[in-house]
Amino acid sequence: MQQHPQKYILNPTIDRVFTSWEKVIKELGLTEYVELSAYGRGGKLYIKASHPAVKQEVLYKKKQIIKEINSHIGKRIIREIIFE
């Protein structure tokens, strides 16, 4: 008997967070340099930057990024961006 791979269903909110993150980062031209590694309780996004200069740019645009992600989602979910 052949087994089918198990499907993992993300919480729809988490799925929207990741999708919105990708859209916003793409609009800023940072797709190749920044990676979203996790979404945590309390509206925290944990990210990795490939270079200190990119980290500084994200820190500079942090409020804008949070605002745009929340706008894509349709409610205020993201409250903080944390670098790993």
Image (cartoon, rainbow, N blue to C red):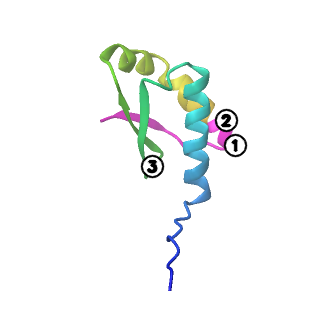
- Counting every numbered tag in the picture gives 3
Quick one: SS at disc 3?
A: loop
Residue 19 - label: none
Residue at left 50%, top 26%? Answer: 31
- The image shows residue 57, relative to residue 41, as above or below, that is above
Q: CA distance from mark 3 to mark 2?
A: 17 Å
Q: Residue 32: image x %, image y %?
A: 46, 24
- The residue to which callout 1 is attached is 74
Per the image, the residue denoted by label 2 is: 71
Quadrant occupied by the C terminus: top left
Front residue (pair 44, 55): 55
What residue sits 58% from the left and 51% below the top? 15
- In front: 45, or 76? 45
Q: Position of residue 76 (x, y in %)?
A: 60, 42
Instruction: Report x, y in % for residue 44.
Output: 43, 43
Q: Amino acid at mark 2?
A: Ser
